[in-house]
Image (cartoon, rainbow, N blue to C red):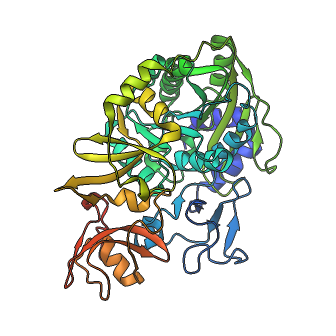
Amino acid sequence: MDSGFVKYLEDAVGTEVAAGFLHALGREPSVSLRYNPSKIPYMVPGWPGEGTGNPGYARVPWNGYAFMLEERPVFTLDPYFHAGAYYVQDSSAMYVGEVFRKCLDEIGCGIAGRPVRVLDLCAAPGGKTTDIAASLRERFGENFILVSNEVMRGRVGILADNVSVWGDPNVMVTNADPAAFAALEGYFDIIVADVPCSGEGMFRKDASAAEQWSEDNVSLCQARQRRIVADVWPSLRADGIMIYSTCTFNRYENDGNVQWICEALGAGEVSVRDGGPDEILRTRFGFLLLPGRVPGEGQYCAAVRKGGHQVPDRFSGHGVRLHRARSAVNMKGLEGYFRTEVSFRSRGGLVIAVPAAVSECTDCVSSAVRTVQTGCAVGEMKGGNLVPSADLALSIVLEEDAFPRVDLDREKALAYLHRDAICIDDAPKGYLKVCYGGLPLGFVKNLGPRCNNLYPQSRRIRIDV
């Protein structure tokens, strides 16, 4: 191990704790997942985590929907995984969601009469986004908008897929540099900035991270992190909260940067220091999770509050209504597909349903930054008929009886997810919603003797089933 890294680690956590981490590097990484409360309000027989009293599954203390697995199954071969029943996420990374939930208690003032607005700035592949979305829906129902952003075009596609599979239409996906959000001055109530870092907390999972470590890289990361925060800072409202996190340990990228945010940008600390197991280290400004003390990998997290005076909210009114009117389309007959009121958009032939509660918010954001995905993809109109999108089946706001449903056994469900041709006996002709264990997977068009498999080619299982 690089002697410079050991020096930085000991400086951050002390010699004894550092020794425990270095010893833990030889152990296998843990496996944990967090289930989707909008799809699985209870444990489902036959999927990972069956039986809450099963000693093979330990609860993650800081997330009521998450637990550890004794070993890593082949998630690709679990239809529940493709149905968005759960998200596989490191348990330490889930602590950012716990700090977020504590911060929700701090933002009550100044939000009355409009949805809560949250930005997940560096969101791919989507673990924190799905956790935050679940917490927002649990707390505010449909009265929230979560902007999930990824600056790297090569990574935003997997983020959009994971958001679609999770199924919450109040999450929109953007692909923008942090500086672009400055156009939305004072817009967001909370910004989660899980910034790119030197990756010390990933050494156990990624040997290349250890090989690439250097003091120069730490300095480079620190400077880049400050630029990212400074660029996006104008879009946070006065009295709003930024949750700053990394998956590294050193003081320079963690407490050092939070101190800089307080001094250079005028932020103040947010008191979220109560609660949490003793194994989580309390630093000057935040929390540090290390392998050897917790089962998961490395994570740092802190929260600060923006000072100053709130600028007038200029993101509602006549200009926004005009923008929405230009993009809206009339889709009579489709409203009955949804459990909530929606407005429709059309993009390149694709019909999109946006929850009415946040349609103005999505238009505001789309007018300022490059938007990849918003609302729920309904499908394409061909010859006056709707060809439904797989995302529609996965959406948590699709009416249960909007389409005839067919439940598949595991073998046929995997064949469907592999995008094989399947036959469904004793089912009506036309578009059918195919399910596994009660959860939708997508659509087929039943022709009688055979079905057209409408599962997206880009998401199909590529290994043998």
Furthest toward the front, the residue is: 332
Find residue 103 and report its horizontal and vertical position in percent: 71, 36
Furthest toward the left, the residue is: 383
Q: Is residue 136 above or below residue 441?
A: above
Q: Is residue 352 visible?
A: yes
Find residue 414 and report its horizontal and vertical position in percent: 35, 76
Q: Nearer the viewer, residue 464 or 337?
A: 337
In which quadrant of the rendered image does the C terminus lie? bottom left
Find residue 257 and report its horizontal and vertical position in percent: 62, 23
Rendering quarter of residue 18: top right
Q: Nearer the viewer, residue 391 or 320?
A: 320
Rendering quarter of residue 165: bottom left
Q: Is residue 50 above or below residue 199?
A: below
Q: Is residue 437 above or below residue 269?
A: below
Q: Residue at x 19, y 85 (%)?
A: 449
Q: Nearer the viewer, residue 245 or 444?
A: 444
Give the left or right position of residue 308, taking residue 451 as reference.
right
Q: Residue at x 64, y 19 (%)?
A: 261
In which quadrant of the rendered image does the N terminus lie? top right
Q: Nearer the viewer, residue 263 or 205?
A: 263
Q: Is residue 368 visible?
A: no
Furthest toward the bottom, the residue is: 426
Find residue 371 and report its horizontal and vertical position in percent: 36, 34
Q: Residue at x 55, y 46 (%)?
A: 128
Q: Residue at x 71, y 30 (%)?
A: 107
Give the left or right position of residue 372, taking residue 314 as reference.
left
Rendering quarter of residue 173: top left
Q: Is residue 51 above or below residue 127?
A: below
Q: How many marks?
A: 0
